[in-house]
Amino acid sequence: MWQAIQSLLSNGSSVVRRRSRASTFSANGNGGGSTAQVIVVGLLADNHDRHLLANVSSGNGWVVHFVDSLAATLAAAASFRVPVILCDRDLLGADWREAVSRLASSSLPTCVILVSRAADGCLWEEVIRSGGYEVLSRPLRPEEVIRVIKLAWSFWNSMLKMPAYSGKRSV
């Protein structure tokens, strides 16, 4: 676990160095206006899903960090201002509801998106009840991943303007 945290912290310092070079977008998803760095954490088992997320992230100027465990994901959420976390339902196992709840209730707000082969209205309702933001169905489609992450970021950005979160630290 200590190695995962050290790795995450070293990645965080590179995020700060890359911040000036990375593209950003405003709350409405377009260029201009107030901007913020978009960091996406991916707890994804499937290499195709990781590759797709890396490709759409680079094309949108997002910084993506892949993690391999719930503990590393929780460490990222506790250490950095992470607007979006994609979690693989298969990796989270039977306790995905608890995992989503723990991630969504971190001290800094985050939008947790569950990635699942089975995605229907009932699963979406369970994700929302657990504190999550959305469900992406597998196989992932680039346009859907982009749309959901942009909407999640916009929602997250509007949450930061609320008095309860305005005093929280940032990276």
Image (tube, rainbow, N blue to C red):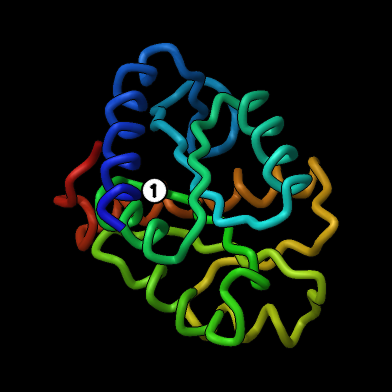
Q: Nearer the viewer, residue 65 or 136?
A: 65
Q: In the image, what residue occupies the spot 79% across and 41% down? A: 142
Q: Is residue 11 left or right of residue 79?
A: right
Q: Which residue is mark 1?
A: 82
| Residue at image point 14% right, 51% down | 167
Question: Is residue 89 depicted above or below 149 in this figure?
Answer: below
Q: How crowded is the residue under tag 1: few (<14 C-alpha within 10 Å), some, or many (20+)?
A: many
If the image is split into quadrants, where does the C terminus sit? Answer: top left
Left or right of residue 23, residue 4 in this image: left
> What residue is rendered at 29% in x and 46% in y?
80
Up the image or down, 103 lies above or below 16; here it is below
* Amino acid marked by disc 1: Val
Quadrant assignment for the N terminus: bottom left
Viewer-proximal residue, 3 or 170?
3
Quadrant of residue 119 within the rendered picture: bottom right
Q: In x, y percent, where is residue 12?
A: 31, 34
